[in-house]
Amino acid sequence: MEEKPKINVLLLESDPGDAEVLCELLTAANYNVFSASEYDESVEIIENNPVGVVVADVSTGSHKGMSAVRKLSESFNRLPWVVLTTFDAQEMDVQRLRMPSRYLLFKHRVNEESLQEAIMQAVGHRDLLDQLEHSKESLVASENRFRTIIERNADVIVIFDKQSNIRYINPSGKFLFGEDGGKLLPQIREFPIISGQGMMFSDEDDEGRQRHWDVRVVVIDWTGELCFLGTIRDVTDWKNAEHEFRKAFVQLERSNKDLETFAYVASHDLQEPLRTVSSFLGLLQRRFSEQLNDQAKHYISRAVKATLRMQEMILSLLDYSRLTTQTQAFKLKSVEEALDLALENLEGAISSSGAVIERDKLPDAWCEQNQIARLLQNLIGNAIKFSDKDNPRIEIRVSKIEDKIYRFSVSDNGIGIESQFIPRIFVVFQRLNRENYPGTGIGLAMCKKIVEYHGGRIWVESEPGKGSTFYFTLRAESRKGGIE
Amino acid sequence: MTEEKGKINVFMVDDNPDDIELTLEAFRETQSEYGFSFDVAQDGIEAMDYLRKNGDFASRPTPDIILLDLNMPRMNGFEVLAELKKDPELKNIPVVILSISQNPDDMKRVNELNANSYIVKPMNMEDYIIVVKKLEMVATSCFFSK
């Protein structure tokens, strides 16, 4: 059998003879016995030993025994008690004692078994009480935890019924909407009453500042009644940030538009004096040719060339600024067709350079086809210009790099670009090789603008002496998905 | 200058003195067999006064061709054109719009107002002379129908 630890018993018995008998019985029943004959002695024992149960005799009739038990039970009422009595009247007295766990035993019935039974009952009752107390404590602790979650929540938690009466509002709610949540009442009628639904609403705080709220509602059973639990969150900062963002976005859009308009008007107006300059120079050449010496004629022809060049630049700037102001809607369109168009426009350059064009079959993409034709024309035109002079070769390739994104590439076998110049090549009027290659310096800037307008990316990889590959990405479908 | 038979009477409405001078020079360059007179107004109101021979303009000739700029102060080219083409006395004079605008909207609007032609101002003297030769053809073709 399993060895149980011995229970310490305090025996309070003022009659030495009885004490001896009881002590023997208890020892035989396998208890550790501490004997005491009066109060002070008992207290000393309890304070110095882990006493598990008190067996006290109140039967001696002496007031001393009863008063010692009363005093002791008041000080140590958590202990289990076995009280030995002789008659019913004493039982009444014992009933008045504050002993939650006690067992009464008539003294004349005391024997080893009944004593053991009494002790077990008292101790068992005490254990039960302890357990009950413990579970009560953990229930309280658990409720406290939940209460903390609700009451310390920064969000407002409100419970309202079908008539929109507020049944509960947490401290955040009281702080933000008044002690009874009264400031919420005009809004609460508008709250959704379907689980999971939400809405936003706005009001003003006491100082008249506008506040924005987001509320989510769930249906709950509130002690047997159908009610609604709303969680209300302060989204003022978020809303204000959103507003600021929108404002900045609109401003940016406007300033971009302004810039385009400006570029258009400016380049348009720039043409005017240029026309005058070049026309008067022409008149000078025609009228005074005989009076001018070669030096003068040379100067005039230099000036005429400069005006022609500036005209070209202005026209390409006009093109560049018109790019996004005069545009068709995006559709799912064939890039293959755009390439055909680009190559058709480049026919002269291709045949005079003798360039070999290698091309993949190109897919449909979400784009403005004319712009993509323009993009390809600029890239391929560029590739022809910078290709190997003896053996020009241009490759147009495509691959799918993400689920809905194509990467197109145009490669040449030409002079390449040194890496330090790469960041500059997409900038308007940046030209790397002014002497040997003609151009206005707007072609690649235009490419960048077209690609970015399509929400794509453009970049170049190049090795000097070996050639360059320009890459750009286009979407396989609209941003929203589908083909509209 | 008085109205002489066999001479092209050109009337140019433009606020840009450079363009006026260049156009005049281009006419001189063509050395047309007809010879020409060249009158100018610098805005639409002055142009209408000229065409209706008001006040000081009483003795001016009826033009064989009107060269009309679009962008002008006081009364612009569109307004002049609309006014002209409503006037039974004036509506048969050929009007050539001579503008720097390449805006398709402008061209469309001018066409709706029954301009006889639209020419973008040339970028250099060579082109100018070609344009003026065409203008002379327009003007002289009206000659024979007179």
Image (cartoon, rainbow, N blue to C red):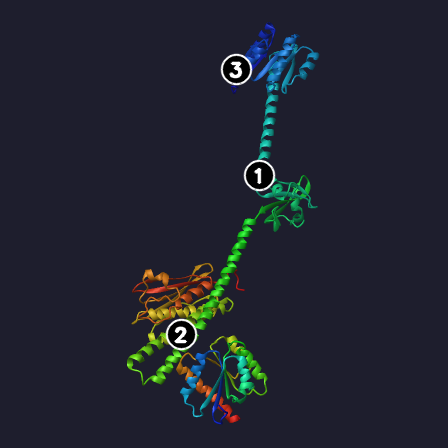
Of the residues under marks 2 and 1, which one precedes in the sequence? 1
Q: Characterize the local packing of mark 1: few (<14), some (14-19) or many (20 or more) Cα atoms within 10 angstroms.
A: few
On the question of residue A30 being in view, the answer is: no
Chain containing mark 3: A
Q: Which residue is mark 1?
A: A152
Compare residues A352 and B12 and report the one nearer the observer: B12
Q: Is residue A314 left or right of residue A386?
A: right
Give yes or no for contact between labels 2 and 3 (Cβ–Cβ under 8 Å).
no
Q: Do labels 1 and 3 touch, CB within 8 Å?
A: no
Q: Earlier in the sequence, mark 1 or mark 3?
A: 3
Which numbered disc, 1 or 3, marks the residue closer to the eye? 1
Where does label 2 land, which residue? A311
User: Residue at horizontal 30%, vertical 78%?
Assistant: A298
Residue at 59% x, 38% y: name it. Answer: A151
Q: Are marks 2 and 1 on the same chain?
A: yes
> What chain does mark 1 sit on?
A
Tag 1 and tag 3 share a subunit: yes
Residue A83, quarter of picture: top right
The amino acid sitting under disc 2 is Gln
Where is residue A88? Give x, y as percent: 70, 12
Q: Pointer 2 indicates a residue of which chain?
A: A
